[in-house]
Image: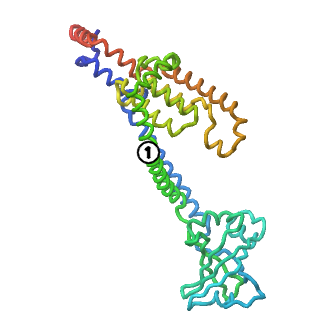
Amino acid sequence: MTWGDNRPPKDLGQELNAVVALGPFGGEDRDMLNWIWAGLIVLSFGFAMWTDVGEMAGDRYRNGDALPVVFEPVDEGEAAAVSLPEVLTNRGEERSLDAFAVIDAQAFGDFYGVDPLPETLRVAVTLTSNRDGVDAKLTAPEAGWPEPLATILPFSQSRDERLLASVDPSPAGDAQGVGLVFEPVQFRKLTDIAQAAFDMADTAFEIALGLTGVLCLWLGLVKIAEDAGLVLALVKVVRPLLGLIFPEIPKDHPALGMIALNLAANMLGLGNAATPMGLKAMDELQKLNETEDTATNSMCMFLAVNTASVQLVPPATLVAIMGVSTGQLWLPILIVTGLSLLIAILAARALSLAPVFAKSDPERLKQAKTLPGRSGDSGAEGRDDA
């Protein structure tokens, strides 16, 4: 055998590492996933900026303009401590009055460029006047705020979560011809993305903190079972079945026991127990892996089987929603999850045989490493031919 480009011969281990590094995408694309994530983030910010600029350019929310409204007293026949005109024209000591804000259906549609409301909107409002002007806190109707007021609400909201606006007084100083000016809506999509990032970070921390106790409990029980020999006994029981699905795993390896425990927990709807079992199973499978950055066929098969596990007991969420009626769905759930498990096994097996994935299979590379003399012989031939 000759080295066509007169390169010095490489050790077989170096060749194998190079093949592993190449993977199905090639050596320069090992960080492709990071580039994909970065591209998605940039794309999302670009889309948000495009949408926000378009909304501001088209004045979608009429920032700074006054929405026409008419104020009505709560009870016209009852003498109040302060009248509605006094509140609207007051610019001195703070005064407050409860009233109703009436927004005409057609005027609302014309103002925001949307379809008219089904009916005139009449909501309770608290008017507060002082030397800086008049503020209005509007209580949401039973059906909720119509768009675009529902979108404006997060930007123009009081501490008691009511819609807050400043009152644009009428020239005559009465309750007719006034308007409501809300806080401007700017960079709505970018704000949503930033808020979602913080919310998901908070959720992730809560989930991780909540799983800590569960992981400690179940992994401790697994360790006790392992030291007591129960895991090895379980391996002997499940070996005939799981050995067909995971032929690469040695027959007495504890990974088979962890896989069996994980599948059993999933089938019985014990999600909190299934998670640490699955992590422990992956840890045991990694001990059989010669590489750190490439999953073995057994790992891929376990992931597929775990995701499409047969469900013997309906999930707790479904039971909470449907109650005793969940029993009617037991047979369909069993059939569907059984078919999904079969498809997952066949798909994982077929993909493991595909050349694009088989060339980076750690098990295949491990078998090639068992031929230590091959590298030296090949190198000798290359030097002699050269």
Q: Position of residue 206 (x, y in %)?
A: 47, 51
Q: Secondary structure at mark 1?
A: helix
Pick the front one: 3 or 278: 278
| Residue 353 visible | no
Q: Quadrant of the N terminus?
A: top left
* Residue at image location 37% in from the left, 23% down from the top: 288
Hey, which quadrant is residue 167 in on the image? bottom right
Estimate the x, y position of residue 267 in percent, counting from the top left: 58, 31
Drawn side of residue 163 relative to residue 23, left or right? right
Q: Amino acid at mark 1?
A: Gly
Q: Is residue 154 above or below residue 321?
A: below
> Looking at the picture, does residue 14 appear above or below residue 47?
above
Camera sees residue 119: yes
Which residue is drawn at the image coordinates 28% and 10% (left, top)?
374
Residue 336 horizontal side relative to residue 227, left or right: right
In this view, the residue in front, 130 or 212, is 212
Can you name the residue that lies furthest to the front here? 228
Q: Quadrant of residue 37?
A: top left
2 or 209, which is in the foreground?
A: 209
Residue at 65% from the left image edge and 29% from the top image edge: 334
Q: Which residue is mark 1?
A: 213
Q: Is residue 122 left or right of residue 361?
A: right
Q: Position of residue 51 (x, y in %)?
A: 56, 56
Q: Is residue 74 above or below residue 103?
A: below
Residue 187 x %, y %:
52, 62
Q: Quadrant of the C terminus?
A: top left
